[in-house]
Amino acid sequence: MSREAARAADVLAQLSAETRLLTLAELVRRAPDGAAVGELRWALDLPLAKVGDACARLVALGVATGSGDGYYRARLEGLREAAAAVDRQQPIAGLLAEYPQLRGNFSHGRLTSLPPTLGERYDLLGELLSRFLDLDGLYDEDEINRRLAEVTDDVAAVRRMLVDTGWLERDRAGTTYGAGRNHRGVRG
């Protein structure tokens, strides 16, 4: 795991503590003004020391700012940075950067929707997934499914789309797959 991904995991793990999460949620609710520790204490009905500790930890995580006099504001950019770090670790992230037209079909490195028509984006998606699969021989269906499962929940539909559009070929028994006719000339 990269340092960036480890930092993102730490931010998310630290936010799993109920007091920190409640404190951040209250700071977000009070945006853009923020709140003093005493105000947070009353709003959350928690001991002052517990709220103060939560605020200090939120500042250390980069998801809140403190003025030095006990006044805090949410800094959601810290969460966005953590999410972006996790996104960059997704196995398809490097390739997806080359296909900006397809970003709307992905969320956090996962294919969430197929293009609505068999137009240009279908070809782009087929090319992208073909490059991601990186097939250099014949593979059984389980291996193709395992690789596709890294980027989609609907493995069967995506595998079928790749076969139907010529990016993946299967034998007559439907058990062995290899690079399809469209795979020739793929950039990469």
Image (tube, rainbow, N blue to C red):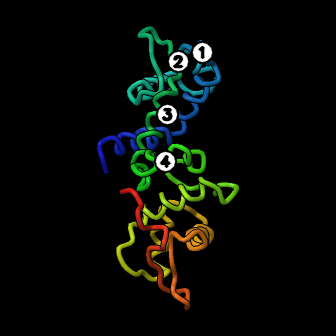
Q: What amino acid is at disc 4? A: Tyr
Seen as rendered, the residue at the extreme bottom is 173
Q: Secondary structure at mark 2?
A: strand
Q: Residues within 10 Å of mark 4 (few under 14, many from 20)?
A: some
Q: What amino acid is at disc 1? A: Pro
Instruction: Tell me the CA gap for discs 4 and 1.
Output: 36 Å
Instruction: Tell me the CA gap for discs 1 and 3.
Output: 17 Å
**Which label sits on residue 99?**
4
Which residue was labeled with disc 1?
32
Q: What amino acid is at disc 2? A: Arg
Is 16 drawn above or below residue 56 in the view shown? below
Q: Is residue 139 left or right of residue 30?
A: left
Q: Secondary structure at mark 3?
A: helix
Precedes in sequence: disc 4 or disc 1: 1
- Mark 1 near mark 2, Cβ–Cβ under 8 Å? yes
Observer-side mark, 4 or 2, equals 4
Instruction: Tell me the CA gap for discs 4 and 3.
Output: 22 Å
Q: What amino acid is at disc 3? A: Arg
- Mark 2 near mark 3, Cβ–Cβ under 8 Å? no
Residue 39 vs residue 25, the one in the foreground:
25
Precedes in sequence: disc 4 or disc 3: 3
Instruction: Tell me the CA gap for discs 4 and 2.
Output: 37 Å
Which residue was labeled with disc 3?
80
Q: Secondary structure at mark 4?
A: loop
**Which label sits on residue 73?**
2
Q: Is residue 67 left or right of residue 117?
A: left
Seen as rendered, the residue at the extreme top is 69
Is 113 drawn above or below residue 60 in the view shown? below
The count of marks equals 4
